[in-house]
């Protein structure tokens, strides 16, 4: 199996419906199958201020709902240890600067960064622009990736603008 670089998955829209129903359970299944890098962190980004403890409890409730017959608690412990939460209110101009400060902690967050945008298509460009404005898309020693959840835009014109 190919070795995957240590990385941090930055999940925008982490408290949304897609994340609750598909993404968190899917990431858990990947962890269960040994398909996530050993040194991978997941930083969930949401609009609200939530403590890490409350966020971890929320993840547990997502998994409990998806796996009513239960799941391996050792895998759950490993999975939950990967998770962190960052509040990024859309009306706060300093939120992306704080995100950069949070991600700069190399002891917690591997510096290869994948941004997964599980948000409305109308928010894609603004988020990527804000990431770029604080230097979070710049590659040097480490790679950066932006993944957008489909649909890409709301029509042909908006898809072309995003491209």
Image (tube, grey):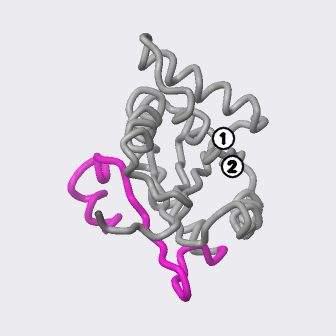
Q: Earlier in the sequence, mark 1 or mark 2?
A: 1
Residue 81 screen position, x and y as percent? 65, 43
Q: Residue at x 52, y 56 (%)?
A: 9
For mark 1, give the secondary structure: loop
* Displayed quadrant of residue 156: bottom left
- Main SS category, magenta section: loop
Whether residue 37 is situated above or below residue 56 in the rendered picture? below
Comparing 15 with 6, the one in front is: 6
Q: Residue at x 47, y 35 (%)?
A: 24
The reply to whether the magenta stretch includes residue 157 is yes
- Give the left or right position of residue 101, taking residue 115 as reference: right
Give the Cα separation between the discs numbered 1 and 2. Answer: 5 Å
- Give the left or right position of residue 117, taking residue 133 as reference: left
Residue 47: image tag: 1
Outermost bottom residue: 140
* Displayed quadrant of residue 83: top right
Residue holding disc 2:
88
Residue 132 screen position, x and y as percent? 57, 74
Span shown in magenta: 134-163
């Amino acid at each position: 199996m190919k070795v995957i670089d240590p990385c941090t998955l930055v999940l925008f829209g982490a408290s949304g419906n897609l994340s609750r129903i598909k993404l968190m359970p899917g990431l858990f299944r990947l962890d269960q199958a040994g398909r996530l890098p050993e040194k991978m962190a997941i930083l969930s980004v949401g609009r609200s201020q939530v403590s890490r403890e409350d966020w971890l409890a929320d993840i547990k409730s997502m998994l409990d709902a998806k796996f009513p017959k239960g799941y391996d608690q050792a895998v759950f412990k490993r999975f939950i240890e990967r998770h962190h939460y960052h509040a990024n209110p859309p009306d706060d101009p300093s939120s992306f600067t704080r995100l950069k400060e949070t991600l700069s902690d190399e002891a917690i967050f591997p510096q290869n960064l994948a941004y997964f945008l599980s948000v409305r298509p109308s928010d894609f460009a603004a988020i990527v622009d804000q990431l770029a404005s604080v230097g979070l898309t710049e590659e040097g020693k480490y790679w950066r990736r932006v993944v957008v959840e489909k649909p890409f835009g709301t029509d042909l014109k908006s898809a072309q603008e995003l491209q």
